[in-house]
């Protein structure tokens, strides 16, 4: 069974159709890549999955169950994270601070807690 499934995702920005009924599935324990030219919709699709954009139509299934992911916080609660392209990272923040951005429970995350969380994530991904 696919861990993550996107079915028929459509997203428009005004008259521009950025995604037109796109489907994608990613199986647990495998590495996946979205490949395409600039402007092909890769980032838009992942932003829909992550919750920073809402699709106009389509379904997101996690573990075979349909989910509504309205915000990045919703995505994070489902274990979905997004590493942005370099221009979306905040240059004034450290690598660790950028990694934890959006994962804070409140307004501030302690450096000790951030390091612990980064170490846990790295271990989970066998880094």
Image: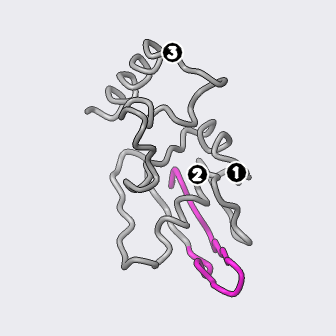
Give the x, y percent position of residue 26.
Answer: 45, 57
Q: Position of residue 18 (x, y in %)?
A: 58, 79
Residue placed farthest to the front in the image?
92
Looking at the rendered image, the quarter that the C terminus falls into is top left
- Reading the chain from its start, which is encountered first: label 2 or label 3? 2
Residue contact at pointers 2 and 1, CB within 8 angstroms: yes
Residue 69 numbered mark, or none: 1
Q: Is residue 21 left or right of residue 117?
A: right
Q: Which residue is mark 3?
A: 110
Secondary structure type for disc 3: loop
Above or below for 35 versus 14: above
Mark 1 Cα-neighbour bin, 10 Å: few <14, some 14–19, many ≥20: many
Q: Position of residue 99 (x, y in %)?
A: 43, 35
By secondary structure, the bulk of the magenta-drawn segment is best described as strand
Please say whether residue 16 is one of the residues in the magenta stretch.
Answer: yes
Task: Determine the residue positioned at 62% across, 79% down.
Answer: 21
- Which residue is pictured at 46% across the width and 53% down the height? 88
Which residues fall within the magenta stretch? 1-22
Give the quadrant of residue 52. bottom right
Dot 2, crowdedness within 10 Å: few (<14), some or many (≥20)? Answer: many
Residue located 68% across and 50% down the image: 65
Q: Residue at x 40, y 43 (%)?
A: 91
Front tag of 2 and 3: 3
As drawn, which residue projects farthest toward the top?
A: 112
Residue at label 2? 50
């Amino acid at each position: 069974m696919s861990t993550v499934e996107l079915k028929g995702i459509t997203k428009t920005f005004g008259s521009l159709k950025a995604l037109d009924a796109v489907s994608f599935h990613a199986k647990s324990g495998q590495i996946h890549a979205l490949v395409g030219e600039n402007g092909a919709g890769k980032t838009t699709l992942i932003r829909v999955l992550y919750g920073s954009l809402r699709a106009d139509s389509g379904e997101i299934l996690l573990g075979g169950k349909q989910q509504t992911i309205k915000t990045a916080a919703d995505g994070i609660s489902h274990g979905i994270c997004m590493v942005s392209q370099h221009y979306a990272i905040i240059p004034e923040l450290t690598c660790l601070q950028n990694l934890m951005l959006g994962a804070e429970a409140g307004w501030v995350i302690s450096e000790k807690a951030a390091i612990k969380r980064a170490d846990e994530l790295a271990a989970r991904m066998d880094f």
